Amino acid sequence: MPHPSVSPSPTFSPLYRQIKSLLLQRLESGEWRPGEVIPSESELAVRFQVSQGTVRKAIDEMASENLLVRRQGKGTFVATHDDPRAFFRFLRLVPLAGGIEQAQSIPLECWRAKAGPEAARMLEINLSDPINIVRRLLAFSGKPVVVDEIYLPGEVFGILTLDMLQAYKGSLYSFFESQFGVRMIRAEERLRAVPADRTSAEMLKVAEGSPLLSVERVSFTYADKPVEWRRGLYSTHDHCYFNELG
């Protein structure tokens, strides 16, 4: 006699995780913009009809994930790429000599195209959907260190032009946030060693065949939506890729 089928029990989600999900929805909808203060824990507790401790736990977790930033005596703010600390979250190059260097982004080209199979897969869009492609150099102390080719979904970045990129003085992610309302939350990277071809060697001012670090990145905004795929070549003659674990 066959056993009766047993339907799986619903996945349990702690109350603070449910509040976190509601807060993320508010961020995704743009109710609270990057850099803006969010309502106090007591106000949120009343709004969601939960205890202040539950709200605090949700906010603590979001702060640890760099979604929110607590400022002593001022409140809790939506994290923004305008914060200098955010810059070093997504750029892991440090000089071998030590210290911290500010990078200069030098946009070279910006053009529109149709997504090929790889871009469509990485950005989770349809084949032949419009995309914007940006090529730029990243220089430290005037010396080119990184050449990036960046693929962006046209649905979001359709009006992007080279003039817009060249006119903006901040970081690229700060530009995406302020001009297009897109905040990069997290990224996945794949690294490997490759020899410099003629074009990259000329752009990075290294000998053809020199070892370069290839860094392929997919960046995600709220709801784990991919909004950037980039392929970068890094010269590690004077710099190394630094990552802190634990």
Image (cartoon, rainbow, N blue to C red):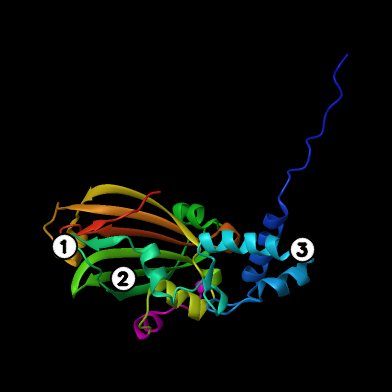
Q: Nearer the viewer, residue 195 or 183?
A: 183
Q: Nearer the viewer, mark 3 or mark 2?
A: 3
Check the image and name the residue furthest to the bottom: 167
Query: Is the magenta region chiefly helix, strand or loop?
Result: helix
Of the residues shown, which amino acid type is indicated by label 2? Answer: Arg
Q: Nearer the viewer, residue 78 or 160?
A: 78
The picture quadrant where one finds residue 236 is: bottom left
Determine which residue is flagged by label 2. Answer: 136
Determine which residue is flagged by label 1. Answer: 97
The picture quadrant where one finds residue 229 is: bottom left
For the residues marked 1 and 3, what is the alpha-carbon distance in whole angstroms? 51 Å
Check the image and name the residue furthest to the top: 1
Q: Residues within 10 Å of mark 1 (few under 14, many from 20)?
A: few
State yes or no: residue 162 in magenta.
Answer: yes
State whether residue 154 appears in this view. Answer: yes
Of the residues shown, which amino acid type is indicated by label 3? Answer: Val
For the residues marked 1 and 2, what is the alpha-carbon distance in whole angstroms? 25 Å
Give the left or right position of residue 66, taking residue 195 as reference: right
Element at label 1:
loop
The picture quadrant where one finds residue 144 is: bottom left
Determine which residue is flagged by label 3. Answer: 50
Q: Residues within 10 Å of mark 3 (few under 14, many from 20)?
A: some
Of the image marks 1 and 3, the number of the one nearer the N terminus: 3
For the residues marked 3 and 2, what is the alpha-carbon distance in whole angstroms? 48 Å
In this rendering, the answer to whether 69 lies above or below 122 is: below
Residue 175's spot in the image, x, y percent? Answer: 43, 77
Check the image and name the residue furthest to the left: 207
Residues shaded magenta? 157-167
Element at label 2:
strand
